[in-house]
Image (cartoon, rainbow, N blue to C red):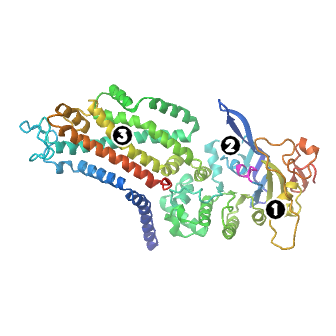
Amino acid sequence: MSENQAILKLDQLNKHFPVRGGLLKRVQNHVYAVNDVSIEVDEGDSVGIVGESGCGKSTLGRTILRLEEPTSGEIWFKGENITDLSERKLKKFKHDMQMIFQDPFASLDPRQRIGDTIEEPFVIYTNLSARERKEKAIKLLREVGLDETHYYKYPHQFSGGQRQRIGIARAIALNPEMIVCDEAVSALDVSVQAQVIKLLKELQDEYDLTYLFISHDLGVVRHFCNKVLVMYLGNMVEWAPVDELFDNPIHPYTEALLSAIPRPVPGNKREKIQLRGDLPSPSDPPTGCPFHTRCPIATEVCRQVKPEWREVTPNHFVACHERG
Amino acid sequence: MTTQTVSAKSIKNVEKESVFKDTFKRILKNKLAVVGLVIISIQVLLAIFAPLLTSYAPDTQNLSARELPIGSEGHWLGTDNHGRDMWSRIVYGARISILVGIGSVGLGLLGGVVLGLLSGYYRKLDGIIMRLMDLLFAFPGILLAMLIIAILGTSLVNVVIAISIWSIPNCARIVRGSVLSTKKEEYILAQRSLGSSDRRIMFKHILPNITAPIIVFATMRMATAILSTSALSYLGLGAQPPTPEWGAMIAAGQDYMWTSPHMTIVPGIAIMLVVFAFNVVGDGLRDALDPNMDLN
């Protein structure tokens, strides 16, 4: 595994959903879900993508996997531009990038046995015989800490944590290089969260996986990831190695997010930064800096001009006029 | 390893049973549906064992024993104006009615499910397919069937074709609606992220998840199909006279309403019971397959 080789590169990626309305169903407006996102993810990274609900982090994950068609910009995966690849050519890459979903109750086909669910990738991509598939599926079940007797069961017979393990088994079946975890542990109990995260880490060591870890739980992100991208209203706000970001947050939005993490140490009170107002609508984003409507230090410039994306210290990027 | 596979197999069987059992148990709680199930079972048994249950062929005429009333010796349901045994004709009629029902509903499902899947899954095809279906909807069903028979000619097979074409738009709409809601489920998205082909997603993942509405539709549609076949045969557009079709029997019997009312009443009751049975079983299935339904 060579360090510092970008496995995924996003260049000015945009995803805007058209809003249709009126008599003729004409496009009246757009929801600007992802705006000009450009990052590079190295092999073996665990990138946390954080932000509040509706900030476009899930859409970003789905767009990277081409489950949504990007509006503009480019997606480079393993040195190839996959933005405009046809469905057939894309299949080769989908083999190497998989996804783990948020809701373990919704992401498994209720009418399919667990065995069949896990074998699905082999059916799609390989010519293995039924017996070989079964052997592999059982091996995967064991690997994610499930029992081989679970092979014939249906999803409704499992707990949330077990189901998420099934989802993970399905995702690692083809030995992918990158996995997008869309809120993969958010729906689980805390104790189960810890187990699943431990499993994800073990698998990362074993398979040299790269994770895109979409989450709103900063505690989990700090523990699990080595780089963090903070998003707000579909825009990149701050992008830094995890310790750098948690220790020296630059953007006021990042500060506010971090201050919302509960502190386990009594007496260690840090002032909580309370953001005023609601998240503006992504279909009618504010001019200038998207955060200026809620920013405690916003000035006239912020209201007019969109801040540039700058590297403040090495590997620490931020979009803010006032700080850094 | 062998013990493992054995235990795995027994798990499999238990599973399959419990899905089936669940529905069946819930159906048994519905008294009316049980009555319907019994009637349908009787019809199916009559249809299968018709030659064993009758002592006359349905079209054997006996001109010395014409228009015998119900309860006559050797002909407990009497005979018709040609001296044919009514019981034989009813039993063989059950065979025709069930075959016509299954045939036309089966064909209708085949067309409706495929069109519904395509139109629900591909937004581009949706407009074209659904407008076509609207076109078929614009005709009253029986008129559409008559039109098709007028083009194809009168025969029982053409009745089956006509009724199946009439069933297609209904089925397509139901399937399309279910596809539209199912394809938004996360497990379908998961399949797409795995790289499944559209065909695989449609038939392997969406179709198994929308079987409940399709089964209910098919059961209800059996009633309509059987009733329509009889109606068309009564009008002379379906089964032709010697065929022991219930609707055709009513048509033949109506000239003898005053002298031999059993010639019309017996096949009439047969049609009524069977249509009633399929309707209540359809209702029962709908409730049994969807536990959220029985809130009222």
Q: Is residue A58 magenta?
A: yes
Q: Residue at x 52, y 40 (%)?
A: B118
As drawn, the label of residue A69 is 2
Q: Position of residue B36 (x, y in %)?
A: 33, 51
Whichever of callouts 2 and 1 sits on the residue coming sooner in the sequence is 2
Q: Position of residue B92 (x, y in %)?
A: 21, 43
Indicate left or right for B55 with B285 as reference: left
Q: Count residues near mark 3 (Cα–Cα under 10 Å), then give few for <14, some for 14-19, many for 20+.
A: some
Q: Position of residue A245 (x, y in %)?
A: 85, 60
Tell me which chain the residue with mark 3 is part of.
B
Amino acid carrying mark 1 in the image: Ala
Amino acid carrying mark 2 in the image: Glu
Where does label 1 land, which residue?
A260
**Mark 2, secondary structure of its residue:** loop
Q: Count residues near mark 2 (Cα–Cα under 10 Å), then give few for <14, some for 14-19, many for 20+.
A: some
Give the magenta range. A53-59
Does B228 sit above or below residue A42? above
Does B190 sit above or below residue A137? above
